[in-house]
Structures are given as C-alpha cells and as structure tokens.
C-alpha cells in the first residue's frame, strides 16, 4: 500500500457519496505532495466533468494519459466527455482506445454504438450493441439502444414498440437523475417517436428542456402532455412556472388554478399561484396611499408613507437595521409586523435578529422576527429561504460541517424552533407549518464508553426531509435520516425516528402512524 492509498480511498469514497467539495480537497492535497499522481488527477477530471467544466476536464484527462497512456478508465471517461460535448468522432476514437486496452467491456461497446448511431453508422452501431449483449446479456441500455437502431432501419416489430418506448422513457429518467440532460432528452424523444401518445415522456422532456433554458421548446412539450392527458396536474404547474418566468402572469395564474382544481392540496402550485397573484396585484405607492386616504385619512397616509419609505432602505447592514427599526414605529409587534415583509422584495429582518452566516440566500418577502438567529459554524453549508418564508421569534438555525438548511416557499416556522444541520441536511418543503418548540437534528453523538460525551464523534443516518404541505405540532423532535411525507401531520410532543408516509397522521414517542388523512373524508 502506498503512502497516498488511504487518502485516495477516502477521496473516492467522498466522490461516490457526492460530497464533491471534500473529495476535491483531498485530491488537491495528494497532488501537492505528488503533482503527477494519476488517480488523483483523474478524480479531479471527473469532478470538473460533473460540474460542467468540460475544457478543464479535457485538459486533466489528457494530462493523465500523458502519464499513463494505457489508462482504461481515462479513455472511457474521455469518450463520455466527448459524447457529452456532441463530438461524436472524437468519442468514437476514445472508446476504441479503451477497447484496445480492455476488449471485453460491454459498457464500452454500448457507448461506442451510441456514438456511431449519432453519425448514422447504423450497421456498425448495431454490431456494437450486439457485442455488448454477447458479453453482458442483461445490459438493458444496450438492448434498448439496439432496438432504437433497428427502429431507425425500419426493422423493429410494431408489437415491440410500446415496450421499448417505456424502456427509453425509464432510461431517460435515469439519465436525468444523474444530470446527463442531453442523453435524457435523446431517450425521451426516442420514446415519443416510438409511442407519440406517451404523456409522461412529453412532460419529462419539458422538464429537461426547461433545465437547459430552452423555454419555448419546454412549453411545447408541456402543452403536448396536457393535450394527451388534460388532468396532468404537474404539467399544469410546470407550464405555469415557465409562463411566469416569461412575464405572462395571467396565463400562469390560469394554469396554477387548473392544477389546484385537480389537486387542492398541491403545495408548490399554491405557492406559485400566490407569487403570480402578488405580482399581478401589486400597485404603485401613490395608488396605495390614495386608497388609504379614503379609508384612514391623514394619519393613515402618514404612517403608510413612513413605513414604505424606511423599508426601502431595510436590510442586513447597520443602516438597514436602523431603517427597519424606524419603519416599525407605526407597526404593532409580532404578527402586526408581518405585513412589512411585503413593502419591498428584500422582506423584513427584525433589528434584533442575529444573522451571522456567509452563505445565506433569501427569497422575496421573507419575514424574520425578533431574536431569530441564523449562524454558520466552521465549514457550515448554505441556508436557503424561499419566497415568503416566515421565521418567528427565537427560532435558531445553525449549519455546521456538511450541513445545509433549505426551507421552501410559504413555510411558517413558529417561535423557539431549532434547526441544527451537522453531518447532513435539513430540507423543508413548501407550505409547511411547524409549531412552536420543535427541533430538527440530522445527526447524533457516539456513546462508546471511556470517552466524554462532548468529545464523541458525530454520526448520521442521513438528511431530514419534510415534504410539501406537512404540519408539525408543538414540541416535535425530528431525528436524522427521517422523511415526513407530503401533507403528513405529526402530533404535539412526538419524536420522529422513522419515515412517515404521505398524508399520514402520526403521534407518540416514538411517532407511529395512527390513521391517514384520507380516512377523515
């Protein structure tokens, strides 16, 4: 075992666990001691490729091949990189180099066949797919790609087209999850070619196109999915989001309303609908003051103008805090100040709130009440607050090493709640309501004897996830590795140690499902 084998194994472990920052740090330290360590260089190349830095990845892979010309995995990765860039002939060349080193790898023949098919070399592609299946008969991707090539030649039996349409769709889903959008789009389009009425393929094609910023094409895909499946609630919501991005607010509101008619408890659609309505119904300051004049006279106008004026300067800076304090002169405390969050998109941050976080991202019209604390410990990760998130008094959010907190739009977190994200993340969805005195801990302490408790290492079973529309009662404690499903209800005082399904009602210590909300109908 070499001196660098242990840190290299650790870096690979982090890489496989998608902890990219930690993996990159270890690769870099290895290269400080050994500048030409090929495995560490290869790891950095993969990281660059995952992050879309294709030119950096190309340079690193070429450097590795200069050190190890017969590195199979580097030639393979170089072929995948060229394929992702649409450089099909260069991809073919790289895959052939990999096969010269290791001629019995089914995955290489499959990828080589795909690159050849993109250059309309169908016979050669079919031969590659057949060779891949000869080596590994259960390689589904090669089987599907072979069917696609045969279909392009008019040789796929009609009775098999529906089966392979579904198979292409499933491969598209897999590729989308791993971030390979171009490949996912190709599979979705192949699925649609084989079965034009597959609404799910049109919808997911729209999602992939939207992620690439191809909004007009995404709109067409969503509309096509709705023409095939008018009650496709997710397509209504997604189409509304694109139209809202394009400034077509009335059309966006229509699609959100359609989604809510089909699914009244669809939390994301509700949040999007509120956002679009807020933008549609926002009026200028002079019209607002005119309306108040007719209702409340001079003092109403004066107090409104006072709050509007100072909230324009509100923010996290010292002067911003002073401006916020001045704005509160004519606003009652506690809930009486919630409306100040709507006076400006930067929202309301109480002067006494303690914000000590370098990686904090706010949505629009966020409300942060008195004595709220948002703190970043050493190496702590991001805190992201969605639009119209409300954090009430004495709530505490802290991120430590490998921990992040994300809170979705229109979520309300009531006083004295605590979120301590160490070792894993806390992810709260849209329209979640969390009552007072709740605590979320995505980590635990070791308890081995012979060591003081505060010196024990932290460990975790995974992230805490609270899905859209859930309701958490007073004093609930949620522990690591737990998912609380969409629309679930957790009764007061419960300790959640296991997953709670969508729409379930759970109570007790430990929390147990006692019924489903559907039973209440």
Image (tube, grey):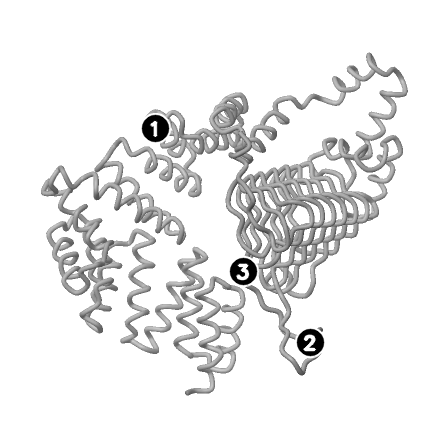
Is residue 320 at least partly visible in the picture?
no
Front of the two marks 1 and 2: 2
Within-10-Å neighbours for mark 2: few <14, some 14–19, many 20+: few
x and y, in percent, of residue 152 in the image: 15, 42
Residue shown at the point (46%, 70%) measured from the top left: 13
- The Cα atoms of the two marked residues, 3 and 2, are separated by 21 Å
Residue shown at the point (56%, 51%) measured from the top left: 465
Q: Which disc number belongs to residue 462?
A: 3
- Of residues 501 and 451, which is closer to you in this image? 501
- Of residues 402 and 519, which is closer to you in this image? 519
Looking at this view, name the residue that lies furthest to the top.
Answer: 294
According to the picture, the residue beneath numbered tag 1 turns out to be 224
According to the picture, the residue beneath numbered tag 2 turns out to be 455
- Of the numbered discs 1 and 2, the one sitting upstream in the chain is 1
- The Cα atoms of the two marked residues, 1 and 2, are separated by 59 Å
Front of the two marks 1 and 3: 3
x and y, in percent, of residue 68 in the image: 32, 77
């Amino acid at each position: 075992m070499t001196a660098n084998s242990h840190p290299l194994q650790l870096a690979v472990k982090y890489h496989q666990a998608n902890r990219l920052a930690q993996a990159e740090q270890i690769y870099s330290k290895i290269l400080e001691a050994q500048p030409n360590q090929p495995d560490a260089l290869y790891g950095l190349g993969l990281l660059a490729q995952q992050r879309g830095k294709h030119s950096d990845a190309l340079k690193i892979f070429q450097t590795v091949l200069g050190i190890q010309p017969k590195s199979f995995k580097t030639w393979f990765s170089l072929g995948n990189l060229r394929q992702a860039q649409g450089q099909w002939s260069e991809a073919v060349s790289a895959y052939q180099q990999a096969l010269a080193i290791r001629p019995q790898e089914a995955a290489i023949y499959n990828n080589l066949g795909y690159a050849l098919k993109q250059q309309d070399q169908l016979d050669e592609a079919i031969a590659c797919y057949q060779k891949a299946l000869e080596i590994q008969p259960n390689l589904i991707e090669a089987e599907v790609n072979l069917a696609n090539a045969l279909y392009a030649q008019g040789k796929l039996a009609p009775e098999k087209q529906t089966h392979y349409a579904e198979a292409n769709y499933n491969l598209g889903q897999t590729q989308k999850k791993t971030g390979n959008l171009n490949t996912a789009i190709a599979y979705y389009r192949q699925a649609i070619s084989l079965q034009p009425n597959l609404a799910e393929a049109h919808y997911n094609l729209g999602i992939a196109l939207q992620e690439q910023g191809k909004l007009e094409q995404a709109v067409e895909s969503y509309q096509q999915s709705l023409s095939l499946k008018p009650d496709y609630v997710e397509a209504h919501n997604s189409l509304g989001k694109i139209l809202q991005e394009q400034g077509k607010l009335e059309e966006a509101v229509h699609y959100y309303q359609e989604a809510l008619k089909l699914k009244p408890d669809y939390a994301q659609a509700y949040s999007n609908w509120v956002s679009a309505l807020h933008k549609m119904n926002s009026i200028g300051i002079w019209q607002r003051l005119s309306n108040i004049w007719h209702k409340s006279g001079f003092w109403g106008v004066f107090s409104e103008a006072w709050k509007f004026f100072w909230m324009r300067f509100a923010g996290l800076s010292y002067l911003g805090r002073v401006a916020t304090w001045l704005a509160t002169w004519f606003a009652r405390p506690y809930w009486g100040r919630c409306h100040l969050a709507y006076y400006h998109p930067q929202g309301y941050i109480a002067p006494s709130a303690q914000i000590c976080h370098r990686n904090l991202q706010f949505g629009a019209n966020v409300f942060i009440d008195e004595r709220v604390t948002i703190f970043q410990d050493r190496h702590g990760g991001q805190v992201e607050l969605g639009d119209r998130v409300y954090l009430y008094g004495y709530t505490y959010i802290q991120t430590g090493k490998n921990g992040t907190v994300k809170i979705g739009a229109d979520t309300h977190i009531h006083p004295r709640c605590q979120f301590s994200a160490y070792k894993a993340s806390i992810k709260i969805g849209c329209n979640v309501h969390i009552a007072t005195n709740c605590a979320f801990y995505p980590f635990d302490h070791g308890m081995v004897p012979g060591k003081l408790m505060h010196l024990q290492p932290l460990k975790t079973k995974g992230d805490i996830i609270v899905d859209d529309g859930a309701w958490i009662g007073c004093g609930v404690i949620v522990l690591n590795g737990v998912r609380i499903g969409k629309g679930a209800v957790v009764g007061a005082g419960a300790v959640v140690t296991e997953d709670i399904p969508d729409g379930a009602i759970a109570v007790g210590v430990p929390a147990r499902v006692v019924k489903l909300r559907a039973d209440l109908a």
